[in-house]
Amino acid sequence: QKEVEQNSGPLSVPEGAIASLNCTYSDRGSQSFFWYRQYSGKSPELIMSIYSNGDKEDGRFTAQLNKASQYVSLLIRDSQPSDSATYLCAVKLAGYSTLTFGKGTMLLVSP
Amino acid sequence: GAGVSQSPSNKVTEKGKDVELRCDPISGHTALYWYRQRLGQGLEFLIYFQGNSAPDKSGLPSDRFSAERTGESVSTLTIQRTQQEDSAVYLCASSQDQFYEQYFGPGTRLTVT
């Protein structure tokens, strides 16, 4: 059974803090991992992709992948109110032709 | 370059009518996906096209739903005899192939009255 799980939240952090968003997946053979941001009433927007174990940094965003633990996370440094959105984790599970999306974690950044 | 485009952006239809939703993928992207997102819910995969291969229709919820794609260009999602539970945002995405990032269009908001 294919599963990508995220805490639905909301995760509330003050402005300037680090927001940590987590995602676990069921398939050890998974190959590609993505984080999307979705503002209310808008379509998902790709933030990060990560394919190998370790950290990948892009500006204020860092994606972390641990395939042994089947865990991928997204850190947002210096969180801004404009980061308030739902963050979707997506995984290319082995044997499936499409991405499997988690249900998303809502992030609220308070000024 | 141009992103994924979808039309119409909004569609209101009466129960029982047929609707067609259009998606124009990013040029050069061989893979095209349709998803449905009901209000407050996650993304629900509907159908996937990869080049000239047979589409993966495993997510289509009923035989009222169908989709076509000509080559690596425009795709049309058709919903026949619409029901109120079909009300949702229909999202299209494209990617270079199944292993790469998917880029989403703005979606079509379908309301069935």
Image: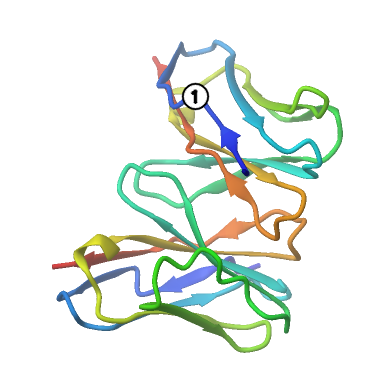
From this viewpoint, is residue A34 visible?
yes
Q: Is residue A76 above or below residue B21?
A: above
The image's colouring method is rainbow
> What residue sits 64% from the left and 57% below the top?
B102
Count of marks, rendered view: 1
| Image quadrant where residue A19 sits | top right
> What residue sits 71% from the left and 71% below the top?
B29
Report the amino acid beneath label 1.
Answer: Asn
Q: Residue A102 at what x, y percent from top left? A: 54, 39
Q: Residue B112 at what x, y percent from top left? A: 19, 68
Q: Chain of mark 1?
A: A
Q: Which quadrant of the rendered structure holds the C terminus of chain A?
A: top left
Comparing A52 with B62, the one in front is B62
User: Which residue is disc 1 drawn over?
Assistant: A7
Q: Is residue A28 above or below residue A66?
A: below
Q: Which quadrant of the rendered structure holds the N terminus of chain A?
A: top right
> What residue sits 18% from the left and 80% below the top?
B16
From this viewpoint, is residue B21 visible?
no
| Image quadrant where residue B83 sits | bottom left
Q: What kind of element bears circle 1?
A: loop
Label 1: few (<14), some (14–19) or many (≥20) C-alpha neighbours in 10 Å: some
Comparing A63 with A16, the one in front is A63
> What residue sits 56% from the left and 71% below the top?
B57
Q: Is residue B101 above or below residue B112?
A: above
Q: Residue B13 at what x, y percent from top left? A: 19, 75
A61 left or right of A38 in image = right
B75 left or right of A63 in image = left
Comparing A91 with A51, the one in front is A91
Q: Residue B73 at what x, y percent from top left? A: 62, 83
Return the residue found at the far bottom.
B70
